[in-house]
Amino acid sequence: MKFVGFPSGKVRVTPLPDLFFSELLPQIDDLAELKLSLHVYWRLAHRKSPLCLSFSELRGDALLRRSLNGQALEDALARATRRGTLIEVLMRDPIGAVEHWYFANTPGGRREAARARAGQLPLGGSAASARPAEARERPNIFALYEQHIGMLTPLVAEQLKEASQTYAPQWLEEAFGIAALRDKRSWRYVEAILQRWAREGRSTDKVAR
């Protein structure tokens, strides 16, 4: 799907040290490792405590599963750990099962990893509730159409398929929601919203009326 560009207005940002780009990025020659590293740093940047992610969390992450799953995820984690991008700590839960926890190799991440190894950082469960809202699986465009407009027809299904390859999932979800809120339950109205956002930027005062 073609990326339509970052929207105008206030958006969330993820800080990364300059050294990530000048020192670390030139060393990474594996796409899966790069995707995994960026994803983990993004997740940790929007998390309060603990500043780490378990293997169980990463394996169940809806966004990560789109491009990394199973053995590919394990290989990417191993590469990132060997390179020093991530710090791995093995901990046993109350029933004796071993869980792998991953920390960013930053001053804060190293302190948290040291606390975990010393038994001073409680690490229980997967803390899935700390996942950013963007990491949740969004409904696909066909489900959105049936939810907000009605039964699909073959002609509309083709149009929806094309739109899903053009617009970001977040845009689709919001456009359908706006149409439903205004009781304009038609695909043409939703499409007009998306087209105007693509031309002028996403803004609630510039949608089709």
Image: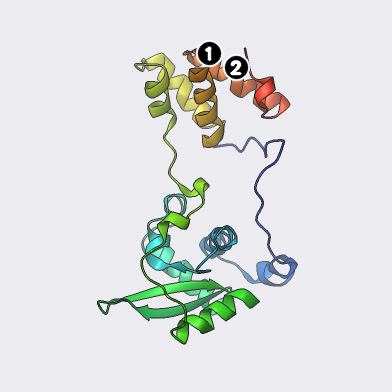
Residue 95 appearing in the image: yes
Image quarter hosting the N terminus: top right
Residue located 71% across and 72% down the image: 23
Q: Is residue 194 above or below residue 54?
A: above
Q: Which mark is residue 176?
A: none
Residue located 61% across and 38% down the image: 3
> Dot 2 surroundings within 10 Å: few (below 14), some, or many (20 or more)?
some
Q: Is residue 31 left or right of residue 199?
A: left
Q: Residue furthest bottom?
A: 118
Q: Name the amino acid, label 2.
A: Ala
> Dot 1 surroundings within 10 Å: few (below 14), some, or many (20 or more)?
few
Q: Is residue 199 left or right of residue 100?
A: right
Q: Is residue 36 left or right of residue 195?
A: left
Residue located 47% across and 70% down the image: 77
Asked if the residue at tag 1 contacts the one at tag 2, i.e. Cβ–Cβ closer than 8 Å, the answer is yes
Q: Is residue 186 above or below residue 177?
A: above
Quadrant hosting residue 4? top right
Residue 27 percent coordinates (x, y): 65, 71
Q: Which residue is mark 2?
A: 192
User: Closer to the camera, 86 or 148?
Assistant: 148
Q: How many marks?
A: 2
Image quarter hosting the C terminus: top right
Residue 130 percent coordinates (x, y): 47, 57
- Spatial CA span between label 2 and label 1: 6 Å
Secondary structure of the residue carrying numbered label 1: helix
Secondary structure of the residue carrying numbered label 2: helix
Residue located 54% across and 59% down the image: 43
Q: Which mark is residue 188?
A: 1
Q: Is residue 153 above or below residue 10?
A: above
Residue 32 percent coordinates (x, y): 51, 61
Residue 106 appearing in the image: no
Q: Name the amino acid, label 1.
A: Arg
